[in-house]
Image (cartoon, rainbow, N blue to C red):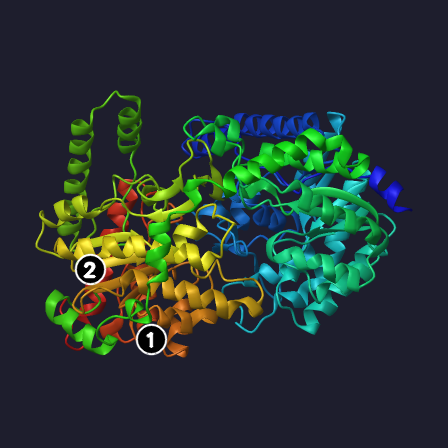
Amino acid sequence: MTSRSAAAAARATVHGYPRQGPNRELKKAIEGYWKGRVDADTLRTTAAGLRRGNWQQLAEAGVHEVPTGDFSYYDHVLDTSVMVGAIPARHRAAVAADQLDGYFAMARGTQDVAPLEMTKWFDTNYHYLVPELGPDTVFAADSAQQVAQLTEAVGLGLAARPVLVGPVTYLLLAKPAPGVAAGFDPLTLLDRLLPVYAEVLADLRAAGARWVQLDEPALVQDRSPAVLNAAARAYRDLGTRTDRPQLLVASYFDRLGEALPVLAKAPVEGLALDFTGPAAGNLQDLAAVGGLPGKRLVAGVVNGRNVWINNHEQSLATLGTLLGLAERVDVSSSCSLLHVPLDTGAERDIDPQIVRWLAFARQKTTEIVTLARGLARGTDALAAELAANRADLASRAGSALTHDPAVRARVAAVTDADGRRSQPYAERSAAQRAHLRLPLLPTTTIGSFPQTAGLRTARADLRAGRLDAEGYEERISAEIREVLAFQEKAGIDVLVHGEPERNDMVQYFAEQLTGYLATQHGWVQSYGTRYVRPPILAGDISRPEPMTVRWTRYAQSLTERPVKGMLTGPVTMLAWSFVRDDQPLGDTARQVALALRDEVNDLEAAGTSVIQVDEPALRETLPLRAAGHAAYLAWATEAFRLTTGGARPDTQIHTHMCYAEFGDILRAIEDLDADVISLEAARSHMQVASELATGGYPREVGPGVYDIHSPRVPGVAEATALLRKGLAAIPAERLWVNPDCGLKTRGWPEVRAALENLVTAAREVRGSLPGGVS
């Protein structure tokens, strides 16, 4: 096919779409079901209506092929485990008794049964449920959900493409099931899994699927020859079967690299590639392997992970080059639009000119359709759109919001000494022990306490003018008093004020820093029914006034025990925002770090002896390929040290990380030079404690003994067992006892019970140690 005919065939599509609905209807229906206010039929009806609305919206916008199978009640990787029959033994009875309740039990656990482990989806802030597999795993196809969603879309008269997690990525994301030897490699199950995928593909073809997309994002990471051979074998097996639809293998988040020739040669009909950000190298790599003759290429030229408008001229130039490299080129987002909010049209509090710089899912869909039309008809057909796009890009580039000379001068004046504490850790540690006088195995929490309906109502009433500032502040004061009183009664050693005034650990700070934009309706799924509104980092960052000092000082006035000052670190402020794309991330991180440094200094001046600077995103933001690790970790750790480097030696600096694999960044964690680090450990059965011990980590550690992402309350025996497992790796004088993460998503009854059990476990174990006092 010639380039002209390839252009004429250009179509618009997307990999996936936000699931929640315009007003988070899915979240409300699911949580209503959990509480018994919504029955299963109503939940299913709500979900079906949301799917139908998404597909119709995409079709009306001009998308030619809508995705199915991307919609999920909780997580698409968990859906894949159901599809292939990989149900953990401890959940099989629940799934057999009621499939929906069993599904949620795998995601959230029950009081008696632990959930699946949860961790980050590559380098995003989305969390997936980790498959548990072992040598005895028996797979069995269950294509009901995928077939049902396809049938719904086809019934609306739409061209639909089911989207599934690919078999290689599924196995690479899995872990050995509890009780299985740690050396077990789930990829050894590939030959057992492929017939199940083949059966699902055959079922989808019978239901009317012309194409099925198999997502293989794990192949954009550095992979061994064995993994690449497995990928070649998988697609040779699936591709040579006759009872299947046409196959589109998709990758995203980075370049495919050495996996590209493997997939290009595979007997599949198409590839979907990301051509944005670090994946832009796919363009040169594709040319180097001779393109995709005779195959379909779905070109991801619109960034599905950020909210800035597309550069149409740049994208059309990329698409024009790609025309000569495939038989057919279609236009798409770089990845699923799951990672961006739904619609800028809902935002009323952002300057209209700035809104023109932004593209959420609906606007990105329009961009994709526009680019497909331009590819098919030529740029003359887009004259008005291109002119408007150029004007909007120029408006952003020339805005005073993006360039503050004072901020830039301060960053330029930073020296190496600014990022170093005045004394080494060993000397600081002694000073802190003498100052704080804490027991062995000190107990604390990560920061937040339950965000009750009353607190959310108070914030809403303040915004709406139904509650004045004085009334709101008294409500916050009362909550802090309750939180402090509970912690003292429970016997917790280092207290927190509970953060009742904070809507979100990033948004709260973003709303008080220059250069950030806050949305009202920009919800994005983090996990399950947990949605966040990532702020938009639009310009240079500074701190006009203290952000946390008032409430921290008030909390400390209520107790003789130390109260932690709570800050969100610079890397997490970037990772959980939609970050600017017009300057290096390291430059932006230094700006945020300097603003936070001022806050650390003011907290110290107000009498705060323990300050926690949370960096849960440090690991998740690590580039997917090793070649980018050193440069990233250099600026990321520098930004943390710049935040904390001015603290006095006797001020104890904590940090916190959660739901990621830490073994490969231990040196970077040490380079943060924090005094205490708390980490997720409950669902992973203290794996991180062993990793830290093996790596020789020399500082104090709090591996979590309470999984706060599940409603279940761990008993004293369970917390004690985890704590003793932690002690097997970390000496008692360096071990803290705490939950995995903040408690804002939990309810007060379960928090009270769980923390009381945690303190009891710490006292029991402490009393059994030499020199310990229960």
Residue behind mark 2: 610
Res 250 visible: yes
754, 703: nearer the viewer:
703
> In the image, which disc is placed on residue 728?
1
Question: Quick one: SS at disc 2?
Answer: strand
Residue 727 higher or lower than 642, as above or below: below
677, 30: nearer the viewer:
677
Residue 556: where, in percent of width, then height?
12, 50
| Residue depicted at x 42% and y 60% | 618
Quarter assignment of residue 191: bottom right
498, 766: nearer the viewer:
498
Q: Give the mark, 2 or 1, whose residue is nearer the N terminus.
A: 2
- Position of residue 711 in the picture relative to residue 51 (left or right): left
| For discs 2 and 1, the disc positioned in front in the rendered view | 2
Find the distance from the CA under tag 2 to the CA under tag 1: 27 Å
At label 1, counting other C-alpha atoms closer than 10 Å, the crowd grade (few under 14, some 14-19, many 20 or more) is few
Question: Quick one: SS at disc 1?
Answer: loop
Q: Pick out the residue farthest to the right.
A: 1
Q: Pick out the residue farthest to the top.
A: 466
Residue 82: where, in percent of width, then height?
61, 47
- Position of residue 345 in the picture relative to residue 658 (left or right): right
Residue 480 higher or lower than 183, as above or below: above
- Position of residue 486 in the picture relative to residue 194 (left or right): left
| Residue depicted at x 70% and y 72% | 226
Q: Looking at the picture, which amino acid does disc 1 mark?
A: Ala
- Position of residue 718 in the picture relative to residue 288 (left or right): left
Residue 539 higher or lower than 131, as above or below: above
Quadrant of the drawing holding the C terminus: bottom left
